[in-house]
Amino acid sequence: MTGSSSFELDKFPRPSIAVDVAVMTVTAAGELGVLLHRRTGDKAGTWALPGRFLRERERLAVAIERTLEEKCGLPARDITGRAPRQLHVFDDPDRDDRGWVLSVAHLLVLPIERLDPVVAEHPGLAIAPIRNDHAVLPDTQKQLPYGQDEIIARAHEELRREYLETPDPERFLETDTFTLSELGVVHFAVLGKENWAIDTFRRKMSRQLRETSAEKRGGPGRPAALFRRSRHS
Amino acid sequence: MTGSSSFELDKFPRPSIAVDVAVMTVTAAGELGVLLHRRTGDKAGTWALPGRFLRERERLAVAIERTLEEKCGLPARDITGRAPRQLHVFDDPDRDDRGWVLSVAHLLVLPIERLDPVVAEHPGLAIAPIRNDHAVLPDTQKQLPYGQDEIIARAHEELRREYLETPDPERFLETDTFTLSELGVVHFAVLGKENWAIDTFRRKMSRQLRETSAEKRGGPGRPAALFRRSRHS
DNA sequence: CGTAGTAATCTCACTTCTGCGAAAACCTTA
DNA sequence: TAAGGTTTTCGCAGAAGTGAGATTACTACG
């Protein structure tokens, strides 16, 4: 920005700023899913990504956090320690028929354990699986409003890029230690079978983790070594 | 966003939106550089990235384009065919002492040939080389205002990520055909010597280019094969 | 207790990648 | 026109990565 006298700010009309968030998780079935909520107001009943308008001098991350709390009943402490990630600013002035709105799209990853109880309790919430790069809605609605399908596509793309190289950087897995299989379920959900090579996966990831002396046993098959995140990831 | 009655837009105060752009180039000396301009107004004389406030219903890319035209005298046709790339939204409400401003940072790559004549003509412009991930300013000023150093760091990081894999995706090189050495100068400028392996570079890039039957000769040394961008890059 | 089933890990041949030095092809200058 | 300098390209041996099958170590069930 250029140096300007302070009243210059008032010279220009200003857009409303919205935040939208694709909360992504890996379901118990091992599928990548996104949190949707049923809208209220004039377009009640349709599914959409959570989002709302930015309040005065509010930070984007805080707006995201409050949206999830207010609209989805997700307690704030379910989000602590997790930072929403900016994806894109949608700036088409005709995107929103209510007026001139810029929308900042975000990605937030949450473990399914945090989402499941909340979704079970609120009928206005759903976790839609993502197939072929778009969300499969719970009923006959085909698309999300305001081109939110593109948000999901961008979120998925971002995740794919990260998960090719790094072991669960967004922490779908919350536990301190985990087996390579557990990690594999997450990566498989993100990457899909076309980008999935189990051998390469195990080798690349185990190199980036610290092995613990413990094992996980109890299930069928050979016990699996438990790994821990390496210090700086 | 949730469905809302249309007057809801007016209920909230709205922030000013600024766009800032790191115009990056590779200088004749083979260094990565960024375009700076001397500010006017109350902080006249200090160097900063070009930027201004978004006008009513203006698209971000258009605001960038006009900023460069109005503030730096870059003719619009120097930018045609090139899309600024969003990097980040800076949302700290205290970032700008003039008020509540969100700033959308962008990266735009331009070939040095387009910048050189304009910079030579305008004394308020400079191309600052980037070393150790921050711009080396032309005079005693140490830092850019409003944390614009972070914009440069993000821009550089983004470029590094792309240029490890793909031959000049942002098109520092504008000519139709080029030799691997000419391409190498650009990649070296972006990646720095620590990420530079000439053999790997040649092999990885030549595979992604189409060889032409022409050669470039005239300089000292063996003539170099001229390559062309492959269709979809 | 033995057998079947399952999951994790190891082994090995094969392919690809990497760094380096040698060779090729040109320009300049004497 | 021959020698020297420069730049590009090729060739090779060693390193690293890949995919598939064999092996190991468990649980479940009769």
Image: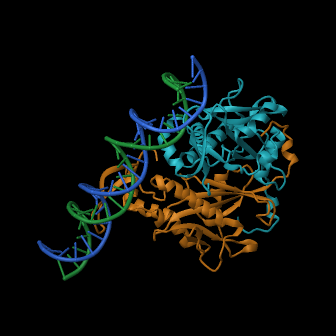
Chain colours: A cyan, B orange, C green, D blue
Q: Nearer the viewer, residue C9 or A123?
A: C9
Q: Residue at x 72, y 24 (%)?
A: A139
Q: Residue at x 54, y 45 (%)?
A: A164
Please name whichever residue, B156 or B4, is drawn nearer the observer in this view of the structure: B156
In the picture, the quarter occupied by the N terminus of chain B is top right
Residue A168 picture location, percent across and down:
61, 46
Along the horizontal axis of the image, is A50 left or right of A228? right
Within the image, what quadrant is residue A225 found in?
top right
Q: Who's the residue at 80% across and 41% down the image?
A: A74
Q: Is residue B221 left or right of residue A127?
A: left
Q: Can residue A82 be seen from the camera position used here? A: yes
The one of B44 and A103 positioned closer to us in this rendering: A103
- Residue B7 x %, y %: 86, 41
Q: Nearer the viewer, residue B108 or B76?
A: B108
Q: Is residue B186 above or below residue A142?
A: below
Q: Quadrant of residue A46?
A: top right
Q: Where in the figure is residue B28, as x and y percent of width and height?
A: 46, 69
